[in-house]
Amino acid sequence: MASHIERRKFLAALGGAAAAWPWPFATRAQQSGLPPRVGYIRAGTPNNDQVREEFVRGMRDLGYVEGHNVAYEFRHYGDDVESIHSLIGDLLRAKVDVIVVGGTAAVRAAQRATQSIPIVMGAAADPLESGLIAGLARPGGNTTGLSLLSTELAVKRLQLLKEVMPQAVRIAILQQPANPAHSLFIKEIESSTGVLGLSYRILQARGSEDFEPSFASMRAWQADAVSVLDDATFIASRAAMAAAAARHRLPLICGVREMSEAGCLFSYSVSVKDMWYRSAGFVDKILKGAKPSDLPVQQGTKFEFVVNLKTARALSFDVSPILLARADEVIE
């Protein structure tokens, strides 16, 4: 009910935002003599941001060369969601022409900060159900981009878990309380755990300092595995998460492939690198005069199932050859 109310408020605000749009950017750039300025904000740091290079490569393939016909303003909020608002303020003061954002919490913060500057979602979990857009075909407002089908994928991972660990009955769910999409994930999981013969318990981690106590609680509850909900801050702190889970001998079930590379037992999701590469196409269209409200939101299409056999061996799990044959990649 709350999401529907929020969406109605969102729809009511669309008209004024669209009317005030400063189009096109190409004309503005010609008049000012300056290249368009693209803001970029997501979790992690410049050193562990696995998709920034893909976004820049996508822009380069479309003819945008930094220092020549485009300028970038990069910001990273690590795993500190409280810093998102101030970093977006930095981008607004830098007078960016478009903001490319990763993570549901960051997209929502950007929307609260501006209704005039276009926002491109590099990857956001179920933006329609989260109330970030009015519709997939016509998102409305100043936001468009790419969507992760995270709720459906969270259930699919539990189904894969039962194939990997048929004996599993207790599943801990790791939630980021600052992620507004996670309530949708949990609702979907609730409806499927009974069918799969699973009981679950939800624990939260707002930052990497919460991993150790959360995993200690999961081990005390005798969890068989941990389902990690998709979140940009979890991806950013994946190495610390995997290390803490290993200390408590808890297998992690994750989303993106980078999580498996860090030590999750397996991951299943769309390729976020592919999505961020494709997000450059939205920026290109907007800089050439398209309105975000008219650009349909696209969904991830390149799915990846990655099994970390090294983790499985460390935890004394036998992964069936049939399941390994289905994997897109096996980490030895």
Image (cartoon, helix red, strand yellow):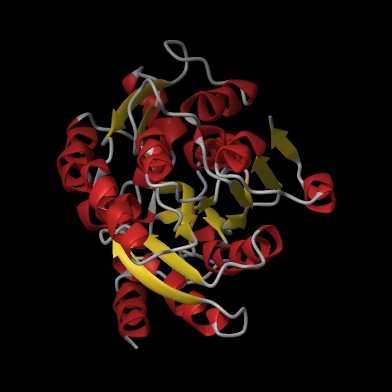
User: Which residue is rendered at x = 52% and y = 84% of the image?
Assistant: 191
* Residue 227 position in % (x across, y down): 48, 59
- Front residue of 47/320: it is 320
**Occupied quadrant, residue 238:** top left
Quadrant occupied by the N terminus: bottom left
**Occupied quadrant, residue 281:** top right
Q: From what the image shows, is residue 259 above or below residue 180?
A: above
Which residue is situated farthest in the bottom direction here?
Answer: 1
* Residue 117 position in % (x across, y down): 32, 46
Quadrant occupied by the C terminus: top right
User: Which residue is rendered at x = 43% and y = 41% of the image?
Assistant: 246
Total marks drawn? 0
**Occupied quadrant, residue 160:** bottom right
User: Which residue is rendered at x = 53% and y = 62% of the image?
Assistant: 150
| Residue 23 visible here | no
Q: Is residue 178 left or right of residue 226?
A: left
User: Which residue is rendered at x = 23% and y = 47% of the image?
Assistant: 81
* Residue 194 position in % (x across, y down): 55, 85
Which residue is situated farthest in the front direction here?
Answer: 316
| Residue 76 visible here | yes
